[in-house]
Image (cartoon, rainbow, N blue to C red):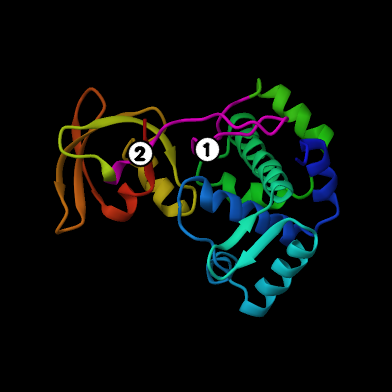
Amino acid sequence: MCTSQGAYSTLRTLSPVAQHHLKIIWTTREWSQDRVSAKLLCEKFCVSASTASEVLQKLSDRGLVDCSRRCGITLTDAGRTAAVMMARRHRLIATYLADALGYSWDEVHDEAEVLEHAVSELMLARIDAKLGYPSRDPHGDPIPAADGSIPFLSTRRLSEFGNGEGGRIARVSDSDSRMLRYLADVGLTLDVTVTILERRDVAGTVTIGLGASNDSIELGNPVAQSIWLI
């Protein structure tokens, strides 16, 4: 089993593009059982199939990923440990940008995407300590600890809840900054309690009650699928 220290050593020898591929493979499977394919990575990175294949081949040669037609792209033990360390970098930096520098939650992702490849291990450890060793980032994603352990939350997508059910917002997808701005504008942020008032599956919408006031908000299914409750 690759240790977290070994993972940092591995990451230092990889290009930012290769580091990013590892992280995306892991985060895609973190919240979904969807098969990771080369096509999916092409869409994520807006690159050609040949470019994605070249990066995957290099990662495979390093013993970090396995590629098969049946199972898709999977991480080896060493690859998973390195990917978790990349997720730790991204999420700690995003948290620092929000908590210490006043970035809004729709601004931190793109900045962290750049900085995660540049900061030293010492700086990352200092950021972690400065923040009080946080367990989640501004979007609710768990922040892996320095030893690679990951806080666990049993969450479900808001879109999976039935009428009268509800919970507390524990995590929101960071893939769409416009959606994050909209959610902040209507008060749908972390730790807010919501209740499902009415599902309209045919129309692809759901009406929710917000907090103690139970003010109603109508959401489309793509937004409801991007919010996890606990």
Which of 94 and 107 lies nearest the eye of the viewer? 94
Q: Which residues are magenta?
A: 134-159
Q: Residue at x 20, y 56 (%)?
A: 204
Q: Measuring 63% from the left and 34% from the top, which residue is drawn there?
A: 144
How many neighbours does mark 2 have within 10 angstroms: few (below 14), some (14-19), or many (20 or more)? some
Residue density around tag 1, few if under 14, some if 14–19, many if 20 or more, within 10 Å = many
**How many angstroms separate mark 2 from mark 1 (CA)?**
13 Å
Q: Which numbered dot is residue 156?
A: 2
Amino acid under label 1? Asp
Q: Residue at x 49, y 35 (%)?
A: 140
Q: Secondary structure at mark 2?
A: strand
Query: x, y percentage for residue 10?
Result: 82, 49
Residue where numbered disc 1 is placed = 141
> What type of secondary structure mainly makes up the magenta span?
loop
- Considering depth in this image, is 42 or 223 the residue closer to the camera? 42
Quarter assignment of residue 61:
bottom right
Residue 48 vs 160, above or below: the answer is: below
Tell me which amino acid carries mark 2: Arg
